[in-house]
Amino acid sequence: MSEMKEPFMTAVFTVSSHTPYVIPEKYKKVYPEEGLIMHKCIRYTDMAIGKFFESARKQPWFKNTIFVLTSDHTNLSDHAQYQTDIGGFCSPIVIYDPSGEIEPGMRDGIAQQIDILPTVLGILDYNKPFFSFGCDLMSTPMDDTYAVNYLNGIYQYVKYGYVLQFDGNETKAVYALDDVLMKKNLKGKVKEQAQMEREVKAIIQQYMYRMKNDKLMP
């Protein structure tokens, strides 16, 4: 990375926490099998990320860099709430600013990976046109943030404190976000359902139109 011309953008996608859950030979005694098969991989990854930051903080570009850490999805878990349809998408997003210009803290709202682009551009005060389905998490009111994903033929739309499951034609289920095990289907019982249906249909229509007509750029 230190050989790249500044400013630069780069990404690292780690796979050590995926099957076949193998870590380098020299670390197998350091991080033995214990608990879930993935636990040793997570400990190894934590150590590796720590070593990266030990090296990165010595580089001239470190304090002028925005670091974003996230996962693509949850994986093996012994917690029931992360084994549900929405629990599999519960991935944290961590934004680290070594310069300290971003005030440390936690924002209690809904976020998704597509929010990373507008959020980073907002931090950079980027003022040129761009297109994104996501939100700037640093400036968008938490009540206006949302998430959408697709699983086994079902769109899941998260907003207003609910998860709406939509098959492309009709709503199949609505769950309160605090119903972490998704036990009580509230379909037809919450006033927000109609608005959520309109919004998820609009997102699907915009995405399909823009993909088909090559309009995902401004």
Image (cartoon, rainbow, N blue to C red):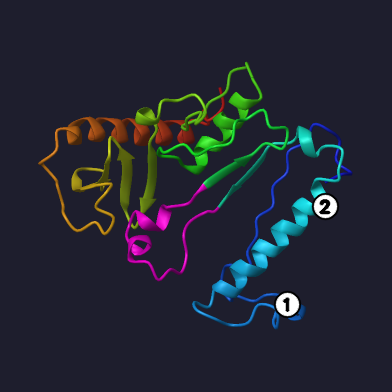
In the displayed structure, does residue 199 sit left or right of residue 76?
left
Identify the mark nearer the N-term, 1 or 2.
1
Q: Residue at x 47, y 33 (%)?
A: 134
- Between residue 202 and residue 17, name the one nearer to us: 17
State yes or no: discs 1 and 2 in contact (Cβ < 8 Å): no
Quadrant occupied by the C terminus = top right
Residue situated in front as seen by the camera: 177 or 73: 177
Q: Write down the region rendered in magenta.
A: 71-92
Percent of width and height locating residue 53 = 75, 51
For image coordinates 87% across by 38% down, the residue present is: 60
| CA gap, disc 1 and disc 2 | 20 Å
Residue 177 rendering spot, x and y as whole percentages: 28, 46
The residue pinned by badge 2 equals 55
Residue at the outermost top position: 127
The residue wearing badge 1 is 27
Counting from the top left corner in percent of width and height, residue 161 is at 27, 39
